[in-house]
């Protein structure tokens, strides 16, 4: 069924014995699980035209640098020793990478202890990445990851939302008001920091492995204000209506101080960025279902967050 991926595993990764392959996840990228000889491996097919080759390699270099202090996916080079496999077609280049399969337990119903440990894991990620950045040479490829600045988070998102055919005129006026409020808050609370962030550290990208948490899917990693990283699990709490029981646990685990304004602005910016991606992701099945309703719900979250409705 997945002939292209089977050929890649055979030719680029020397799979000789019979193996099974199926889709593990379809979203920003397509993730395949391949199994043979009672062992499993992950093959990721990167979304076309999203990242340049250098940016994908930068993600992998960060994973290699972070391994040890953190439990993160380990890339497996192809038979030519390259971390990324390039498949050339007449129209485009398609990128693949192979990773070790991490045998862990998903956290489907997180507890306050789980959120405390996620906070600890984020703190360790930020501390470790600061040391890596400090010691890296200026032209290190890891610095090629995207920057989560105002243009990327607000201005580009506004453009795609404004062009969305499933939003009405009232929605677009609301969108412009939110973009203005977020831009003002970005300046007022000095959100133009440039630190490494995971970009998508919610419980769906975490596995429990023994006594530790393994942090997965660095596809959104880049540079920005650290409140953006804190804003991702906060958004998931807002959506699940669990801010009150779990938010303090996450902050206590993180054990670094943000102002309330930084947290609310970072969360609002991250939600607006997510809303802006929806018009560009109509190939993803679940996003095609009532995209306007999803975006309006995100707008409500942002308005409530900036107004201080959700507890701290």
Image (cartoon, helix red, strand yellow):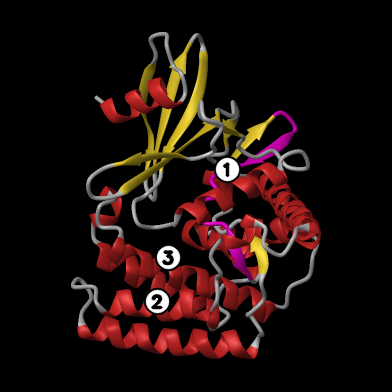
Q: Viewed as shown, does residue 136 lie left or right of 237?
A: right
Disc sitting over residue 156 in the figure: 2
Q: In the rendered structure, which disc, 3 or 2, sits on the residue that comes first in sequence?
A: 2
Residue contact between numbered discs 1 and 2, judged by CB atoms under 8 Å: no
User: In which quadrant of the rendered view does residue 228 lie?
Assistant: bottom right
Q: Secondary structure at mark 2?
A: helix
* Residue 116, x across and y down, in percent: 72, 50
Q: Secondary structure at mark 3?
A: helix
Q: Is residue 75 visible?
A: yes
Q: Secondary structure at mark 1?
A: loop
Q: Viewed as shown, does residue 221 lie left or right of 1?
A: right
User: In which quadrant of the rendered view does residue 166 lie?
Assistant: bottom left
Mark 1 vs mark 2: give the one in front: 2
223 over 124 or under it: above or below: below
Residue contact between numbered discs 1 and 3, judged by CB atoms under 8 Å: no
Disc sitting over residue 100 in the figure: none
26 over 154 or under it: above or below: above
- Residue 220 painted magenta: yes
* Residue 231, x across and y down, in percent: 59, 65
211 over 189 or under it: above or below: above
x 65%, y 69%: residue: 227
Q: In the rendered structure, which disc, 1 or 3, sits on the residue that comes first in sequence?
A: 1
Query: Dot 1 surroundings within 10 Å: few (below 14), some, or many (20 or more)?
Result: many
User: In which quadrant of the rendered view does residue 289 lie?
Assistant: bottom left
Please give the range of residues in magenta: 210-224
* Residue 13, x across and y down, in percent: 47, 24
Between the residue at mark 3 and the residue at mark 2, the CA separation in whole angstroms equals 11 Å
Image label count: 3
Disc sitting over residue 274 in the figure: 3
Between the residue at mark 1 and the residue at mark 3, the CA separation in whole angstroms equals 19 Å
Disc sitting over residue 216 in the figure: 1
């Amino acid at each position: 069924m997945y002939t292209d991926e089977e050929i890649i595993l055979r030719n680029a990764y020397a799979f000789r014995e019979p193996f099974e392959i199926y889709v593990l996840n379809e979203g920003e990228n397509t993730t395949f699980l391949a199994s043979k000889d009672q062992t499993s491996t992950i093959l990721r097919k990167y979304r076309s035209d999203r990242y340049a080759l250098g940016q994908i390699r930068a993600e992998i270099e960060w994973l290699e640098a972070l391994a040890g202090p953190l439990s993160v996916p380990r890339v497996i080079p192809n038979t030519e020793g390259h971390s990324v496999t390039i498949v050339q077609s007449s129209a485009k280049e398609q990128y693949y990478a192979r990773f070790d399969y991490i045998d862990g337990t998903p956290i489907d119903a997180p507890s306050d202890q789980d959120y405390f440990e996620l906070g600890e894991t984020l703190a360790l990620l930020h501390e470790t990445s600061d040391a890596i950045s400090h010691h890296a040479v200026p032209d290190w490829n890891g610095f090629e990851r995207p920057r989560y600045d105002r243009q990327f988070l607000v201005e580009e998102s506004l453009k795609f939302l404004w062009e969305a055919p499933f939003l009405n005129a009232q929605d677009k006026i609301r969108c412009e008001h939110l973009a203005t409020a977020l831009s003002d808050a970005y300046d007022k609370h000095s959100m133009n920091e440039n630190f490494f962030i995971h970009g998508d550290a919610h419980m769906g990208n975490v596995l429990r492995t023994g006594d530790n948490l393994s942090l997965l899917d660095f596809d959104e990693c880049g540079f920005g204000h650290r409140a953006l990283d804190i804003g991702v699990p906060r958004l998931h709490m807002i959506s699940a209506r669990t801010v009150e029981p779990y938010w303090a646990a996450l902050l206590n685990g993180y054990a670094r101080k943000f102002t309330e304004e930084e947290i609310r602005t970072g969360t609002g910016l991250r939600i607006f960025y997510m809303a802006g991606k929806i018009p560009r992701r109509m190939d993803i099945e679940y996003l095609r279902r009532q995209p306007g309703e999803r975006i309006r719900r995100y707008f409500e979250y942002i308005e409530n967050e900036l107004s201080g409705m959700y507890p701290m």
